[in-house]
Image (spheres, helix red, strand yellow):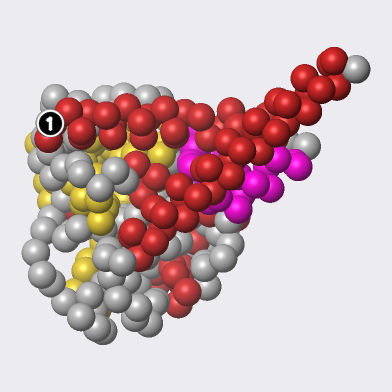
Amino acid sequence: MSSNKERQTQVNGARRHFLGLAAASGAKVAALSALTATTVLPASIAQAIGIPWWKKGDQGGGNPMCFLLGTAITTPAGEIGIEHLKTGDLVTTVDGKAMDVKWIGRHIYKRNGASWPTGVLPIRVAKHAIDRQTPHKDLYVSPGHALLIDGVLIRAKDLVNGITIAPALPDDRKIIEYYHIVLDTHEAVLAEGLAAETFLLKDGNHETFTNFGEFARIHPAGKVSVMKPFAPIVGIDSGREHLKALISARFRRALQVREPARNTHRRIALRAESLIS
């Protein structure tokens, strides 16, 4: 009898914990939404609304996942702005390999209103936001672009703390250009000194890029293999997904997947607070 009461207490505790997370998640979404006015979103983003991130192709080309124009990428010849890279150029991966670029995907968005929608507005990872050396300059990536931190891939928007990592642009611009790197395999390269993923090719998701026609000409159908993730992809789910996990048979597994993202977010947020205190 006592064991049943004890088990019920644990369940109630878990429920309160996840309700708290749901409330916090809702507050975070509201805060981010306040940063931009509502505008018409590009089709690739509009179609993704309401679909869990792991089901909408978010790990490579959907909603978009790219580096902002001007981002410096490490190559064997030194750092080069991503917009200057082309097919056949070499880039350096985090494990020191020199790999040739198979294609550079490009997204171009034009602002229709007074401000940018949150799905397009880049996330700024401020200089030294991760540690005392990383990144060595402000890095701007799209919200869904994954960064390699603590051995796992975490989307930039899951690291937002409102201080050192937050939605922002380096200037007031009416056009946003994003670029992404396609290699033979899914890898991590150094962008402004911070490890960030290359494009995760799968199920024709390259067609979300503005210049997808180039890809078809360079790589005819059947010539490119679907890629496997370079490292585990983890995230902090929405409040709704937290609540669903309470009654899911995969509750324990889901909790284990989210924990690395939460721990990394907490560590970086504490660092951000220490920098302003």
How many circles with numbers are drawn on the protein? 1
Residue that numbered label 1 is attached to = 277
Residue 220 lies within the magenta run:
no
Residue at 30% of width from left, 76% of height from top? 37
Residue 206: x and y in percent read 45, 62
Residue 4 in which image quadrant: top right
Foreground pick, 53 / 94: 53
Q: Pick the quarter of the image with the C terminus.
A: top left
Left or right: 140 in relation to 252: left
Residue at 71% of width from left, 25% of height from top? 10
The local secondary structure at tag 1 comes to loop
Residue at 50% of width from left, 50% of height from top? 23
Left or right: 132 in relation to 167: left
Residue 73 visible here: no
Query: Which amino acid type is marked by label 1?
Result: Ser
Residue 239: x and y in percent read 55, 50
Left or right: 215 in relation to 57: left
Task: Note whether 225 is above or below 193 in the view shown.
Answer: below
Q: Specify the segment rendered in magenta.
A: 228-248
